[in-house]
Image (cartoon, rainbow, N blue to C red):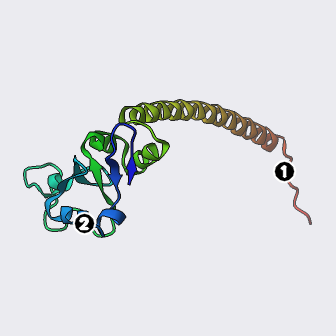
Amino acid sequence: MKRDKTSNAPIIIMEEYWRNSHLSIVKYYGQIKAFGTHYEILNKEGISVLELSNPHSKHFVSGGMAIPEGEPCDLVRKDWIPVYRKLGRERTLDAVRMGLSSQGAIEYYGKWNQRLEENMALLNTVIGQFSMKIDDAVKAIDKLSKAYNRLKIPNSKKR
């Protein structure tokens, strides 16, 4: 459980904690009001159990468990659900550990993604230039090989 500065209520209650506590009743309802705050069970993609169990939802899971055994499912405070959906489980947990606000987490990872995209574009440019140099080298070797083959004197047969 991790709390933020604006509320004393935990932001995320990981399954390992709530599954073996008084909060375990949430598995029957998909949501709970605890610590004066509304929480929902979300899978690692940020989809709530309520959506996964609703036949009218595009996320409906038919013929099985909404969240398979072994897949993480956390209780997420209502104001952090959009962040969890946007960033995913791991990045949201990292943001909470860093002490970022919900808006700060989105901004931080937005800048992070932008830097990643810029670095990937730079890397692609370098790879492209390197590939062109390799292509030029291969063409030069091919030309040299053809020129060498034209200069070769045929072997005379030994008698």
Residue 10, x across and y down, in percent: 34, 49
In front of the other: 135 or 17? 17
Q: Earlier in the sequence, mark 2 or mark 1?
A: 2
Q: Tell me if 43 is positioned left or right of 115 in this view.
A: left
Residue 107, x across and y down, in percent: 42, 30
Kindly identify the residue that appears in the image at 75 percent across and 40 percent down: 141
Kindly identify the residue that appears in the image at 66 percent across and 35 percent down: 130
Residue 154, x across and y down, in percent: 84, 51
- Crowd around label 2: few <14 · some 14–19 · many ≥20 (10 Å): few
Secondary structure beneath label 1: loop
Indicate which label's residue lies in the foreground, 2 or 1. Answer: 2
What residue did someone put label 2 on?
22
Instruction: State the image quarter where residue 52 is shown.
Output: bottom left
In front of the other: 107 or 137? 107
Image quadrant containing the C terminus: bottom right
Q: Tell me if residue 151 comes above or below residue 23 in the rendering.
A: above
What residue did someone put label 1 on?
154
In front of the other: 65 or 58? 65
Q: Tell me if 115 is positioned left or right of 28 in this view.
A: right
Q: Do tag 2 and tag 1 residues touch (Cβ < 8 Å)?
A: no
Instruction: State the image quarter where residue 86 is shown.
Output: top left
Residue 104 badge? none
Residue 151, x across and y down, in percent: 84, 41
- Crowd around label 1: few <14 · some 14–19 · many ≥20 (10 Å): few
Q: Tell me if residue 2 comes above or below residue 80 in the rendering.
A: below
| Disc 1 residue type (three-letter) | Pro
In front of the other: 93 or 156? 93
| Disc 2 residue type (three-letter) | His
Kindly identify the residue that appears in the image at 24 percent across and 43 percent down: 78
